[in-house]
Amino acid sequence: MLVFEKNNMTDEIEQLVNKYGKSRSSLLPILQDIQRKHKFIPDFAQQEVARLLDIHPVEVYSVITFYSFLNTKPKGRNIIRLCQTITCDLAGKENIAKAIERELGIKFGETTKDNKITLEYVNCLGMCDQGPALLVNERVYSKVTPEKAIQILNEIK
Amino acid sequence: MESKSNLRSPVSQQAHVIEKPKDITTIGGTVTIEINEKKVSVPFGTTILEACKMNGISVPTLCHHEDLCVAGVCRICVVEVEGMRTLQASCAFPITNPIKIKTSSPMVRKARRHIIDLLLSEHYGECYSCFRNGKCELQNLAKEYGVDTYTFGHVTEPRYEVDNSSYSVIRDMSKCVLCKRCVRTCIDLQEVGVLEAVNRGHETMISTFLDKPLLDVICINCGQCINRCPTAALRANDPSDEIWAAIDDPNKHVVIQTAPSPRAAICEEFGMEAGHSLTKELNTALRRIGFDKVFDTNTTADLTIFEEGTELLLRLYKALVKKEEVALPQFTSCSPGWVKFLEHYYPEYIDNLSSAKSPQQMFGALIKTFYAQKVGIDPANIVSVAVMPCSAKKYECNRPEMNSSGYKDVDYGLTTRELARMIKEAGINLPEMPKSDFDSPFGEASGAGLIFGATGGVMEAAIRSVYEFITGNKTEDAFENANVTPVRGFEGIRYVEIPLGDKFGPVPDILKHLIPNWDWLKGVTLKVAIAHGTANAKKIMDDIKAGGKFSECHFIEFMACPGGCLGGGGQPIPTTPEIRKKRAQAIYAEDESLEMRKSHDNPNVIRLYEEFLTDGPCGHTSHKLLHTHYTKRGRYIV
Ligand code: SF4
Ligand code: SF4
Ligand code: SF4
Ligand code: FES
Ligand code: FES
């Protein structure tokens, strides 16, 4: 990171700390905000969050690596997450996965060359009675069919 | 500081309290319970584990450690509590009701056995090639519970690469049982925060920030995590193979210095109870192993008092008389873990650190200059080993600036544990050794040097000398038997004021060229403080930063390890509050038994100034050989 980028990052985190407070329990909301904005949590940001909350960088890293929805490496601008847990699996998750992979030409765990879309598996999204379930950024789609999945893909900018 | 301490679980808030109060504080009286059908009464709030211990019933533990907050993650300590559906972790169950407990029912035994089998199913390692063989808590559990097969299988390949980047600590996560004792140690006791659990589920492992090698993150090398790890997942970087090779090489002159804390603790490695110093037995054993000379680190501890004490007096003189800008309070610099802690977290206070080297490094520089000249040996052929209670000493001797003799001043830092193993390997039973003295030209040292091993010891040694330098009186006049008891003890932070009065003696000859008289100290009260465990150091530093009472101190002793060196990361495992206390008793008893109790009475040191360091304490030669400089490292690694 360049110096001015670091400074901007520090300013940004200071604002978040002001907004959520300095206590340990502010860690998750702060990380979520950074994740939402940058699509990942840069190494430098982790250190700054630690410094401003008076905890240790490894504690921040520990939390990030625990949660699937927080990540330390940049990903695509849009993240598509397909539920891989058993009910969705039985409801036809595999077909959805194949359809999406074929359409985008990448596998799950990968990002498209233009950085537009990242594909990931997730565990139960709490929509088990309406599977297969798909999460596009922060929006959930239920009872997805291969056709519907392609349509959803086409709607993404 | 405030906000944080409220958020960790209760025991860890008291991380700085090394000693538990004798009686467990009773809030709301006692509760009568039944353990294995026997009625006992315990203070309200006692954990089941403590209650069992108090009544002589043993319950196995793994993640529990007396120095640390409750974690309750391993479940090996489960017991049956009547009326509860599931088994309960006894270490994390405070007694508030008259419950009935069974500690060894079939259900309990089966559950514990399962837990052990599951741990072993993920554990890579063969005990006979393992440094914890015979001293491993996991191995012990397997033995106690009669494990004879791997019910759930066993891994045959290492799951993780060994991290041996650090000079001090080696991490072998394939042997980790995820008890998080190291995590709690590094965060709660030390406030360094190197280690945490990363990832989730079966991928969980203990790792560092961004999974970097230990050398590349902010680790102060204190080794406290090693001392609390139940298995061999953490161990010190052991140089004994290289040392054997040097001993076996006829062209090498191998000298060894022994620090006071290993001498007070090594008995534990030979099956003795804690609290016996084996100083003179060790001298004999070391010669039998093949070391050419055995020296006493206390000699240079005495020298440290001259150098660091003079430095302090000069700083005060400059500040009070010459009105110069000098960094005060002066901080001690003999704990390399503390030094690195400050370099990372408080780099702006680097000038407050005494520039005097630690006794280990002073000795190293003298051995390859003064001693080499005296005995006519080429320093290139001298191998200098230091027996230390400390894993950070391994790092310290590898600091690039530590070569003022023109060679690497100290070649190897060896821990108490490693030395014990070498002695055993040589077939020697240490406690049976005849006693013998240290070698000349250094010979005997003072009791002041000896007590460097306990928290408050450097301060006490300094007071014993500085008080006499200034007042011309005997320390005994102010402190009974020269025991400066106010600076002793195990409280995490101690603050002491010593009024200097207005009756001063003449300036001793050795300092005359630096300071003309003491009049300027009239009415001054010397303010000193002591902290051990870097979590406590942090509290003092934050107070200084905020301009609190510690910023008005003149001199502060900091030790990275809880209890001081005697609780160092290279000491025998286990190290508990009880054991630390016994080691301290051994050290203070040895001090009291000596004739020479004050650094400035050490004739070897006085001779050193006459023959070699001829421009006196803090003079030119001293500065070249006995003083050092520090690096502003800062807290950012990316
Ligand atoms: S860590 Fe303990 S159980 Fe594992 S191999 Fe070493 S001695 Fe054996
Ligand atoms: S050596 Fe000390 S600082 Fe380093 S990881 Fe262990 S406890 Fe933490
Ligand atoms: S490294 Fe040792 S202390 Fe740390 S979690 Fe693993 S087994 Fe426990
Ligand atoms: S299993 Fe897919 S949402 Fe629950
Ligand atoms: S010792 Fe009680 S849960 Fe680990």
Image (cartoon, rainbow, N blue to C red):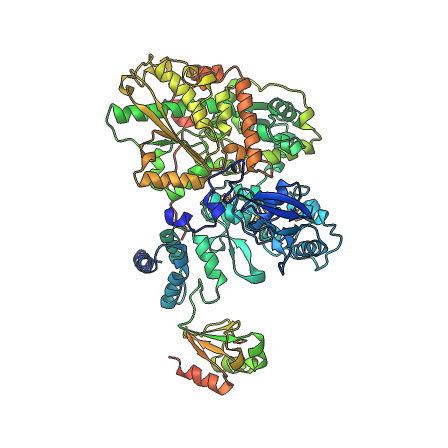
Residue A34: x and y in percent read 37, 63
Image quadrant in which the C terminus of chain A is located: bottom left
The reply to whether residue B618 is in sight is: no
Residue located 59% across and 55% down the image: B160
**In the rendering, at what x and y percent does residue A77 appear?**
39, 72
Q: Name the residue at the left extreme.
A: B323
Which one is in front, B77 or A6? B77
Which residue is situated farthest in the right direction here? B148
Q: Where is residue B45 in the image (x, y as percent from the top left)?
A: 53, 47
Expressed as whole percent of the image width and height from the top left, the position of residue B193 reads 46, 48
- Vertical side of B487 occupied by B241: above or below: below
Quarter of the view holding residue B41: top right
Compared with residue B402, is residue B71 higher up or lower down, i.e. above or below? below
Residue nearest the observer in this picture, B402 or A81: A81
Q: How many numbered markers are drawn?
A: 0
User: In screen coordinates, is B547 left or right of B213?
Assistant: left
Quadrant where the N terminus of chain A lies? bottom left
In this rendering, does residue B428 appear at all? yes
Residue lying at 47% horizontally and 56% vertically, measured from the top left = B210
User: Foreground: B51 or B375?
Assistant: B51
Q: Is residue B115 left or right of residue B557?
A: right
